[in-house]
């Protein structure tokens, strides 16, 4: 069977979700799976006319060939009307990185619309792949029975890093790897840092601004008003080699995210032996152990400020957290394990689709 993977826009984007898709696509092909990627035009997840046309074209083409279809969660609303039909077709899988309606900053009507579209689509697919047990718990129940839910956690590439025996001179170098969207909390992070005056620090923010350019402008404006152009560097999207350099150069990883479906950047920080200061939303508490840094209850800037101050002022604690981060990293799986679980979900979807023909 030939499979078709539908994703909004080009696959070669440096965000956690797109990197996950690209790694699994590559892994499935290496295992001999015939797989075509369809880069969908239009706006997602609020599907416009172009998105609906692209979804219909992909749907029709994959069905005509008797193939299976894998839909990235961002594209799911565009496929919801097609999934509502009773036309016979091959197996369909939805890949959910995190529930669409839980994106920060949505007005109630938009959140309700996205939740309804996602729920309607998920009730019709043959299998649902999620990236964490936390996301599975959010989706389980109702018409989505547990047998259709599969947890394929992201893999993490092994790295080699020589850890310093003593703190490096100069400011504490903070690293935040996250797209510039409200859910990721950059404005909360900057507000928290404005109250940290006991220790010198520098911050590098790595992540693209395609998702919410208005929010990205607010981040830059907040930085500029504080006079932090030299202190806070916003890089945009970077390639894997540049991202690896940022991890190697950092002293402390920070995240102010309200929700993560898994937290690939957090897992990468563990692999690089970085101590972590983070919130606990979604799957974060499952990805980052309490021994590897400070996990904050609540997303208020004052809580984040207190944790950042403690972490930056105590290099001895950071060294301890580094050792614990490396210990946790050894427990993380690779992309081969992710791909194997995904392939099991595909087999399950085929069996379910056949039973309902």
Image (spheres, rainbow, N blue to C red):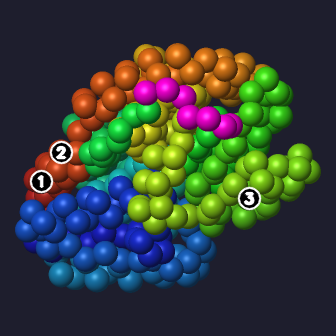
Check the image and report above or below for 89 versus 251: below
| Residue at image mark 2 | 337
User: From mark 1 to mark 3, how far is it between C-alphas?
Assistant: 41 Å
* Placement of the N terminus among the 4 image quadrants: bottom left
Check the image and report above or below for 283 versus 123: above
| Residue at image mark 3 | 216
Instruction: Identify which residue, 172 or 61, lies in the foreground.
Output: 172
Tell me if 311 is positioned left or right of 10 in this view.
right
Percent x, y for residue 99? 50, 45
Indicate whether residue 233 is drawn in magenta: no
**In the image as oriented, which residue stretches furthest toward the right?**
225
Residue 272 visible somewhere in the drawing: yes
Asked which secondary structure carries label 3, the reply is helix
Residue at x 68%, y 37% (from the top left corner): 171
Percent x, y for residue 20? 35, 56
| Residue at image mark 1 | 347
For the magenta stretch, what is the residue range?
A: 165-171
* Placement of the C terminus among the 4 image quadrants: bottom left
Instruction: Identify which residue, 18 or 207, lies in the foreground.
Output: 207
Q: Nearer the viewer, mark 1 or mark 2?
A: 2
């Amino acid at each position: 069977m030939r499979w078709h993977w539908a994703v909004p826009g080009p696959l070669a984007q440096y965000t956690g979700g797109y990197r996950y898709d690209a790694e699994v696509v590559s892994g499935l092909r290496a295992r001999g799976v015939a797989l075509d990627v369809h880069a969908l035009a239009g706006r997602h997840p609020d599907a416009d006319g172009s998105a609906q046309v692209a979804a219909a074209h992909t749907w029709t083409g994959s069905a005509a060939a008797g193939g299976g279809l894998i839909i990235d969660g961002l594209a799911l609303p565009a496929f919801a009307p097609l999934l509502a039909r009773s036309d016979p077709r091959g197996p369909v899988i939805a890949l959910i990185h995190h529930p669409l309606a839980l994106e920060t900053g949505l007005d109630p009507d938009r959140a309700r619309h996205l939740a309804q579209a996602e729920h309607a689509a998920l009730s019709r697919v043959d299998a649902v792949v999620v990236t964490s047990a936390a996301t599975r718990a959010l989706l389980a129940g109702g018409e989505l029975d547990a047998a259709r839910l599969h947890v394929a956690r992201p893999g993490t590439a092994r790295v080699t890093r020589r850890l310093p025996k003593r703190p490096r001179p100069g400011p504490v170098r903070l690293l935040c790897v996250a797209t510039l969207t409200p859910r990721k909390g950059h404005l909360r992070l900057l507000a928290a840092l404005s109250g940290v005056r006991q220790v010198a620090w520098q911050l590098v923010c790595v992540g693209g601004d395609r998702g919410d350019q208005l929010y990205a402008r607010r981040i830059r404006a907040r930085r500029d008003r504080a006079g932090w152009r030299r202190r806070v560097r916003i890089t945009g999207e970077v390639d894997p080699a540049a991202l690896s350099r940022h991890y190697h150069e950092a002293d402390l990883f920070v995240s102010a995210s309200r929700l993560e479906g898994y937290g690939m950047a957090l897992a990468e920080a563990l692999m690089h032996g970085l101590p972590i200061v983070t919130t606990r939303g979604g799957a974060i508490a499952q990805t980052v152990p309490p021994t590897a840094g400070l996990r904050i209850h609540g997303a208020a800037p004052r809580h984040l400020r207190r944790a950042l101050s403690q972490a930056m002022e105590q290099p001895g604690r950071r060294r301890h957290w580094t050792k614990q981060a490396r210990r946790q990293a050894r427990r993380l799986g690779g992309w081969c394990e992710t791909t194997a679980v995904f392939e099991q979900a595909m087999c399950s979807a085929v069996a379910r689709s056949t039973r309902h023909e």
